[in-house]
Image (cartoon, rainbow, N blue to C red):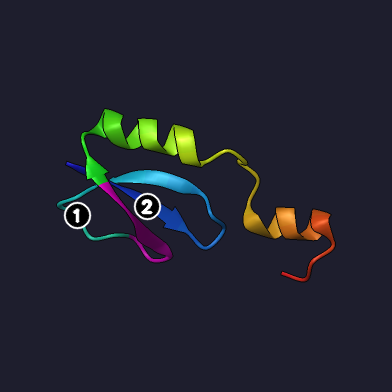
Amino acid sequence: MYLVVRNDEEQYSIWRADRKLPAGWYREGLSGTRQECLDHIGVIWTDMRPLSLRRRLAGVDA
């Protein structure tokens, strides 16, 4: 089993469910097989740019 995880920059990854999450990463909600998690990330992560870059380009303070 794997988890979909996200960091403060809104970057996504998968993590084995039986392991402690590394600092700065948070459970996104979905758990499942490796492929199910990767498929979910493929649907929800449409802008790969880090949040701080998106904000900077939009003229918003980070």
Most distant residue in the bottom direction: 61
Residue 15 located left or right of residue 41: left
Residue 47 located left or right of residue 56: left
Q: CA distance from mark 1 to mark 2?
A: 12 Å
Badge number at residue 41: none
Magenta part, dominant SS: strand
- SS category of the residue bearing label 1: loop
Q: Quadrant of residue 61?
A: bottom right
Disc 1 versus disc 2: nearer the observer: 2
| Image location of residue 50, percent across then percent down | 63, 51
Disc 2 marks a residue whose amino acid type is: Val
Magenta span of residues: 22-30
Residue pointed to by mark 1: 19
Disc 1 marks a residue whose amino acid type is: Arg
| Image location of residue 27, percent across then percent down | 33, 58
- SS category of the residue bearing label 2: strand
Crowd around label 2: few <14 · some 14–19 · many ≥20 (10 Å) = many
Q: Quadrant of residue 13?
A: top left
Residue 25 located left or right of residue 44: left
Q: Residue at x 24, y 46 (%)?
A: 31
Quadrant of the image for the C terminus? bottom right
Q: For residue 10: magenta?
A: no
Crowd around label 1: few <14 · some 14–19 · many ≥20 (10 Å) = few
Q: How many marks?
A: 2
Badge number at residue 5: 2
Residue 8 located left or right of residue 40: right
Say whether marks 1 and 2 touch (CB < 8 Å).
no
Q: Residue at x 72, y 53 (%)?
A: 54
Q: Residue at x 43, y 38 (%)?
A: 41
Q: Is residue 7 above or below residue 33?
A: below
